[in-house]
Image: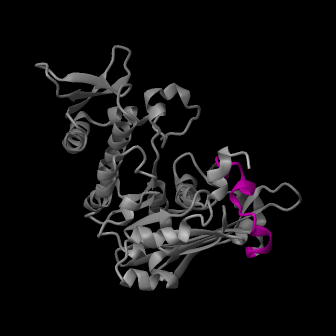
C-alpha cells in the first residue's frame, strides 16, 4: 500500500493542499514555510490510528485543535480541518476523508464532522450515521482508531500506524534522561539504542553489519560497530577505529561526532523501515553530514526503496540532494509563503520553471529562485546598529 494523493484544508499554515505523491518526495521551502508541518500531517494520521492513540490524543499532542487548525480557517471550509488521503494497494484504490470541527457551545472540543472510507469508488463508511446522531459523544472518536468498527478497512489503520519519523538529536541520544516525555517511540533518539537492543540478536547483528559496511566507506578510519550492554543493563553503541596500535581504539555513543550519530541513526532507520514498509518521514537528513555523503543520499534512498513498499518524504535545505540526476521535478514539492497561507506545488507543475527545467539548469538553482528571500540587507546589517 502507498499514498498517492493528499488533499487538505486548514492544516497548520496551509489553507489548502493538493499534492500527488510518488515513491519519494523532497519538500523544500524557506524557513517557517511549513516543511515540518507538511510532514506532520502524516505523523498525525499515524497518531490517530496507532496503538494508544486516537483523535483526541493526536490533537492534544499538538496543543489542541486551535493549534493545528490554520489561521485562515474561519473563512475556509466552514472552519473545518480537512484531511483527504488517497492510497493504492495493488489493484485496489482507497480513500480516507476526515473533517474535524470544534464542538459548539464554547467548549471547542474536537468532533468528527465527517468520516468517509471508499474502496474502489464504493463508500463503505460514512459518518455521522444514525448511531452518531443518537449518541453524539461517539463523534469524539474516529472509526479508524476503533477495532470494533474498522474491520472493513483495518488495513488502512495498520498502514497509517506504520508511519515513522526521523529527526535524531545527537545530544538526546548521548543523554536520554534529558528528554521528558512518554511516547512509545521517540523520533529524537532517547530510545534509539534501546530499540536496537530490543530486536532479536540475529536480526540486530545482521542490520548492524550492513550499517558497519556503510560506515567503513563514509567515516575515516571507521572499522567496527557493535552493541554492548553495561553492568547496569544499559545498551550502548561501541565503534572501533583504526590507529597505530595493534587493537582499534574504542568509542561509545557519548564520544561519537554529531555527524556519525546522525548517519548511524539514518542508516538504522532505513534498514529497519525497509522491513516494515509504509511512510518514512525524514527531517533534514543532511544535518551534520559531509556534503559528499549528502550527495549520495538520493541513491541510498533509491536502493532502500527497490521493493516499492517504502515511501520516503523528506524536508531539506541541501541543494546537493536536489542536483542528483535521479531526482525528478515531479518529486520536489516547493513551498512558498503568501499572504493567504503557504502554497505547495510540485516543481514539474510550476509554469515559470518549465523553460529552466527543459534547458537543463541545475534543479537547485531553479528551486532557489522560488524559495530564497529576495532582500537580506536587514539580516546583513544586524550588527551595524542601523
Q: Nearer the viewer, residue 4 or 371?
A: 371
Task: Point out residue 260 in the picture as x, y percentages from the top left corner.
Answer: 33, 38
In the figure, is residue 18 to the left or right of 92?
A: right
Specify the quadrant that holds the N terminus. bottom left
Q: Nearer the viewer, residue 165 or 134?
A: 165
Residue shown at 29%/70% (left/top)? 325
**Residue 143 drawn above or below residue 245:** below
Residue shown at 55%/67% (left/top)? 371
In the figure, is residue 288 to the left or right of 19?
A: left
Residue 4 can be seen in this image: no
Q: Nearer the viewer, residue 143 or 73?
A: 73
Residue shown at 44%/63% (left/top)? 155
- The quarter of the picture where residue 88 lies is bottom left
Colouring scheme applied when the structure was drawn = one colour
**Residue 94 drawn above or below residue 193:** below
Task: Point out residue 20 in the picture as x, y percentages from the top left corner.
Answer: 47, 76
Per the image, is 86 magenta? no
Find the residue positioned furthest to the top.
Answer: 231
Residue 230 can be seen in this image: yes
Magenta stretch: give its range. Answer: 59-77
Task: Point out residue 315 in the picture as x, y percentages from the top left corner.
Answer: 47, 58
- The quarter of the picture where residue 224 lies is top left
* Numbered disc total: 0
Find the residue positioned furthest to the right.
Answer: 105
Residue shown at 25%/39% (left/top)? 219
In the figure, is residue 244 to the left or right of 372?
A: left
**Residue 383 drawn above or below residue 377:** above
Task: Point out residue 6 in the picture as x, y percentages from the top left corner.
Answer: 53, 72
Amino acid at each position: 500500500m502507498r499514498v498517492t494523493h493528499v488533499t487538505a484544508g486548514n492544516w497548520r499554515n496551509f489553507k489548502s493542499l493538493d499534492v500527488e505523491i510518488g515513491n519519494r518526495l523532497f519538500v523544500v521551502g524557506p524557513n517557517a514555510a511549513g516543511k515540518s508541518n507538511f510532514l506532520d500531517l502524516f505523523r498525525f494520521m499515524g497518531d490517530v490510528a496507532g496503538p494508544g492513540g486516537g483523535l483526541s490524543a493526536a490533537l492534544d499532542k499538538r496543543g489542541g485543535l486551535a493549534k493545528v487548525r490554520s489561521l485562515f480557517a474561519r473563512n475556509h471550509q466552514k472552519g473545518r480541518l480537512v484531511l483527504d488521503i488517497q492510497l493504492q494497494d495493488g489493484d485496489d484504490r482507497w480513500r480516507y476523508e476526515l473533517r474535524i470541527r470544534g464542538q459548539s457551545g464554547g467548549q471547542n472540543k474536537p468532533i468528527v464532522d465527517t468520516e468517509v472510507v471508499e474502496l474502489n469508488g464504493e463508500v463503505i463508511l460514512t459518518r455521522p450515521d444514525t448511531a452518531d446522531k443518537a449518541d453524539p459523544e461517539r463523534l469524539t472518536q474516529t472509526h479508524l482508531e476503533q477495532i470494533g468498527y474498522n474491520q472493513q478497512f483495518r488495513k488502512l489503520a495498520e498502514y497509517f500506524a506504520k508511519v515513522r519519523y526521523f529527526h535524531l538529536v545527537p545530544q538526546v541520544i548521548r543523554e536520554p534522561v534529558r528528554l521528558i516525555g512518554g511516547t512509545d517511540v521517540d523520533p529524537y533518539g532517547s530510545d534509539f539504542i534501546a530499540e536496537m537492543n530490543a530486536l532479536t540478536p540475529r536480526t540486530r547483528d545482521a542490520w548492524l553489519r550492513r550499517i558497519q559496511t556503510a560506515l567503513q566507506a563514509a567515516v575515516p578510519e571507521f572499522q567496527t560497530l557493535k552493541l554492548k550492554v553495561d553492568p547496569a543493563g544499559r545498551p550502548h553503541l561501541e565503534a572501533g577505529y583504526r590507529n597505530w596500535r595493534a587493537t582499534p581504539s574504542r568509542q561509545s555513543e557519548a564520544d561519537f561526532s554529531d555527524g556519525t550519530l546522525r548517519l548511524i541513526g539514518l542508516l538504522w532507520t532505513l534498514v529497519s523501515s525497509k522491513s516494515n514498509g509504509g511512510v518514512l518521514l525524514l527531517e533534514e537528513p543532511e544535518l551534520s553530514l559531509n556534503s559528499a555523503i549528502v550527495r549520495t543520499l538520493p541513491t541510498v534512498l533509491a536502493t532502500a526503496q527497490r521493493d516499492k513498499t517504502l515511501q520516503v518524504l523528506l524536508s531539506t535545505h541541501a541543494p546537493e540532494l536536489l542536483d542528483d540526476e535521479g531526482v525528478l521535478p515531479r518529486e520536489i514539492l516547493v513551498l512558498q509563503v503568501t499572504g493567504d497561507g503557504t502554497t505547495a506545488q510540485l516543481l514539474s507543475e510550476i509554469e515559470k520553471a518549465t523553460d529552466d527545467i527543459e534547458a537543463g539548469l541545475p534543479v537547485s538553482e531553479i528551486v532557489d529562485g522560488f524559495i530564497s528571500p529576495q532582500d537580506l540587507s536587514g539580516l546583513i546589517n544586524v550588527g551595524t546598529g542601523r
